[in-house]
């Protein structure tokens, strides 16, 4: 064959721009350029030693083979107890499905629930994989705009207007990627009422639940009646600096959990056993690392927000969670896509245009402050110089 002939559905599958920009930045570094990385959402802290030691011991003890596709029972027990304690709803281990990272829960949930033409409401600007998978499966992706004027939450009236008789699923993400916004208890109560009234499922992505700077994390799973209609996504990548370990999990009504397990069997068989044993240590061992990491992220957040607001043409609200800022750059005489390219090429600062997260991200940039305070301050200096030259 002269060229590959792909299935039509592949044309509907999107990507995650952070990895594309990372590859470009690495290519520039290979040419000798100095690049400050603010594009990738990866904690710059090493995985805690006690977690690594638990994995090493597990491997030495022979835990290197297959395990049940739903996950190691001991890990599922620990996860069930953790979610029970943190969300205030009793979870059984059979309602836990372990996957290599949290992304498969997004994919498998949509694959299990959505038929062609079913509508899925998702936050935008939002994690691009939501829309990508909805489109790939053949569902109808319905964006729900996150608005800067309400701290990058969505208006409940906008959600009500988006609901139709074809609505099968609503995706929530709080704290959010890319904006750092969080939903309030009042928001979640109103959302729960709508989900129960219109009988749709809620997929709640809570992978940043521990990276919160004010108040306590709120989950829609905690509201009366919602356990039967909620699929919760969690994982160890962000909280315990375990991105490369690929350890995530979903909490779902057992009938849905069984379907997710079935899809796991048909795709990746299982998640590495020794990784799950390390995951037990992460949840049951000392939590000092998490507290210290979040405190450091808060210092960086404050510095990057202050620094961005000091640059002419940029305004940035202070996020309440995650490790991203989403500054408004609409006052600059250049599109956000061109601006991101300009800052990479001219200033050596790798970041993402807001449109990487959907059309409602137009006029914004996303910066990850999962980098040292020194590097963040250097990036701000470079940006200020480059933008002064741009508008001169």
Image (tube, grey):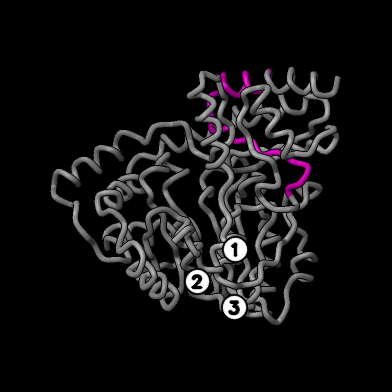
Q: Viewed as shown, does residue 137 lie left or right of 260?
A: right
Q: Viewed as shown, does residue 13 lie left or right of 101?
A: right
Q: Quadrant of the N terminus?
A: bottom left
Q: Nearer the viewer, mark 2 or mark 1?
A: 1
Magenta segment boundaries in residue numbering: 361-381
Q: Viewed as shown, does residue 377 lie left or right of 263?
A: right
Secondary structure of the residue carrying numbered label 2: helix
Q: Nearer the viewer, residue 392 or 242?
A: 392
Residue found at the far front of this picture? 2
Above or below, 228 against 354 in this view is below
Residue at figure coordinates x 43%, y 67% from the top left: 90
Spot occupied by residue 76 in the image (x, y as percentages of width and height): 33, 61
Mark 3, other Cα within 10 Å: few <14 / some 14–19 / many ≥20: few
Q: Nearer the viewer, mark 2 or mark 3?
A: 3
Residue located beneath label 2 in the image: 111
Find residue 116 and name its label. 3
Mark 2, other Cα within 10 Å: few <14 / some 14–19 / many ≥20: some
Mark 1, other Cα within 10 Å: few <14 / some 14–19 / many ≥20: some
């Amino acid at each position: 064959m002269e060229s590959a002939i792909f299935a039509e559905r592949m044309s509907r599958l999107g990507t995650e721009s952070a990895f594309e920009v990372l590859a470009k930045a690495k290519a520039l570094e290979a040419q000798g350029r100095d690049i400050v990385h603010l594009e990738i959402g990866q904690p710059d802290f090493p995985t805690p030693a006690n977690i690594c030691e638990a994995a090493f011991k597990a491997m030495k003890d022979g835990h290197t083979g297959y395990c049940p596709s739903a996950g190691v029972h001991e890990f599922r027990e620990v996860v069930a107890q953790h979610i029970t304690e943190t969300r205030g709803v009793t979870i059984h281990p059979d309602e836990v499905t372990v996957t290599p990272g949290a992304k498969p829960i997004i994919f498998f949930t949509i694959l299990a629930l959505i038929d062609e033409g079913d509508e899925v409401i998702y936050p935008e600007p939002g994690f691009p994989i939501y829309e990508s998978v909805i489109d790939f499966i053949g569902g109808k992706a319905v964006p729900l705009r996150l608005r800067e004027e309400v701290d990058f939450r969505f208006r409940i009236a906008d959600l009500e207007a988006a609901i139709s008789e074809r609505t099968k699923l609503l995706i929530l993400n709080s704290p959010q990627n890319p904006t750092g916004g969080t939903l309030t208890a009042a928001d979640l109560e109103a959302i729960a009422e709508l989900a129960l009234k219109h009988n749709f499922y809620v997929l709640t992505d809570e992978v940043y639940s521990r990276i919160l700077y004010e108040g306590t994390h709120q989950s829609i799973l905690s509201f009366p009646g919602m356990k039967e209609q909620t699929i919760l996504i969690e994982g160890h990548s962000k909280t315990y600096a375990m991105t490369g370990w690929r350890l995530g999990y979903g909490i779902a009504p057992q009938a849905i959990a069984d379907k997710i397990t079935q899809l796991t069997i048909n795709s990746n068989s299982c998640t590495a056993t020794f990784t799950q044993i390390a995951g037990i240590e992460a949840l049951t061992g000392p939590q000092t690392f998490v507290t210290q990491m979040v405190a450091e992220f808060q210092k960086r957040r404050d510095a990057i927000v202050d620094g961005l607001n000091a640059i002419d043409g940029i305004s940035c609200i202070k996020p309440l969670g995650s490790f991203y800022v989403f500054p408004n750059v609409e006052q600059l005489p250049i599109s956000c896509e061109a601006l991101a390219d300009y800052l990479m090429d001219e200033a050596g600062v790798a970041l993402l245009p807001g449109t990487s997260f959907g059309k409602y991200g137009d006029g914004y940039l996303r910066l990850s402050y999962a980098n040292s305070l020194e590097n963040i301050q250097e990036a701000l200096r470079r940006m200020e110089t480059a933008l002064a030259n741009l508008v001169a």
